[in-house]
Amino acid sequence: MEPPRRPTMFDFHGVPMTTYFTDNWDNVQNFKARPDDIVIATYPKAGTTWVSYILDLLYFGQRCPERQSSIPLHERVPFLEISLPSRPAGKDLADQLPTTPRLIKTHLPVQFIPKSFWEQNCRIVYVARNAKDSAVSYFHFGRMNNAQPDPGDWSTFLQSFMEGKVVFGSWYDHVNGWWGKKQTYSKLHYMFYEDLIEDSGREMDQLCSFLGLSPSAEEKERVLTGVKFDNMKQNKMTNFSTVQIMNQKVSLFMRKGKVGDWKTHFTVAQDEQFNEDYKGKMKNPTLQFRSEVSCASERVPTCD
Ligand code: PPS
């Protein structure tokens, strides 16, 4: 099968998008949510796959162990708005999910979320990651994923990222938009990639408390082991090796899995310019990101 052509971006209700995320728009907007659906919402590269796998194992790791070895994670947790030529649309996969709850992934900014999720009062897990590591991860993703526009070189991409001229729009608007929603919508659990890196056990406990789950200590340990970066990297069901549009010879989907990889990409001048611009855009003192985590704990195997 021909790989799809690299798409171009266009303005879609104020957000840069590509047809791969807008072609099925009316159907996506009319998605019929159920009250027990769980949405995993993120800006791209924030740890969507990681949290999707945590949720999938928590709900179905014991109930349906055969799922784990036979169905790729991206089919177990469909990507709602995706619509690639000759592939089932994410919305249809979500409709057809046989599980309860249904776990559904989206990168949509909060204003684009289909209204029935709000009407049904669904639980939403939002995962956010610091801007610098998000930019780096998104850059490499653009290099390897033919369904993304060509990112150009690093400095070109970084400029586009700062200007919000990337698919799904501005990181700054996305994380702030969802943070604003959290203030009025109580079924939204806002979590951070950096916290997960720092202490996955603690974060999983908070997630379970939000979801009303109480796994045994053994079960928790089993999930924590399964979702370790190196294990997910080896696992064909979670490392996207079954997805042909991604050329993992260019860059692996499970690339580094760290906080602070931005330091190997940003020049001093880029860092200064980025920080200045960031201050102007991130004015809400209640929303704070960490671009580094301390590695004092032995639980942090991904720190250098
Ligand atoms: S996507 O395409 O938007 O759904 O990508 P997403 O899954 O949100 O983000 C991919 C980045 O998350 C890293 N990742 C992990 N880090 C630590 N531990 C685990 N288990 C894990 N799983 C995925 C993945 O490596 C990507 O980050 P980078 O920085 O590129 O390595």
Image (cartoon, rainbow, N blue to C red):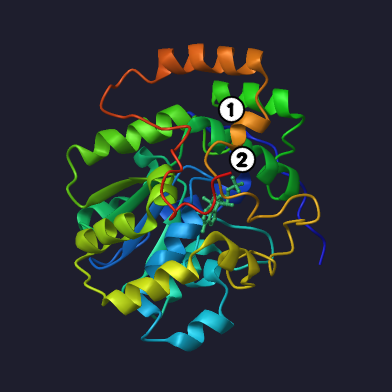
Q: Whole-Å distance between the Cαs marked 2 and 1?
A: 9 Å
**Does residue 119 sit above or below 183 in this rendering?**
below
Q: Earlier in the sequence, mark 2 or mark 1?
A: 2
Q: Who's the residue at 74% across and 43% down the image?
A: 143
Residue hosting label 2: 138
Secondary structure of the residue carrying tag 2 is helix
Q: Who's the residue at 60% across and 32% down the image?
A: 262
Q: Who's the residue at 44% across and 62% down the image?
A: 52
Residue hosting label 1: 161
Secondary structure of the residue carrying tag 1 is helix
Q: Position of residue 202 (x, y in %)?
A: 30, 56
Q: Residues within 10 Å of mark 2 (few under 14, many from 20)?
A: many
Where on the picture, by quarter, is residue 54? bottom left
The answer to whether residue 273 is left or right of residue 243 is left
Q: Does the rendering let one see residue 80?
A: no
**Does residue 41 sit above or below 287 in this rendering?**
below
Quadrant in which the C terminus is drawn:
top right
For residue 144, which numbered disc appears in the image? Answer: none
Q: Position of residue 165 (x, y in %)?
A: 59, 27
Q: Does the rendering let one see residue 187?
A: yes
Cβ at disc 2 under 8 Å from ligand 1: yes
Of residue 286 and residue 116, the one placed in the foreground of this image is 286
Quadrant in which the N terminus is drawn:
bottom right
Of residue 204 and residue 5, the one placed in the foreground of this image is 204
Where on the picture, by quarter, is residue 97? bottom left
Residue type of the residue flagged with mark 1: Phe
The answer to whether residue 168 is left or right of residue 34 is right
Instruction: Say if mark 2 contacts mark 1, CB within 8 Å.
Output: yes
Residue type of the residue flagged with mark 2: Tyr
The answer to whether residue 247 is left or right of residue 159 is right
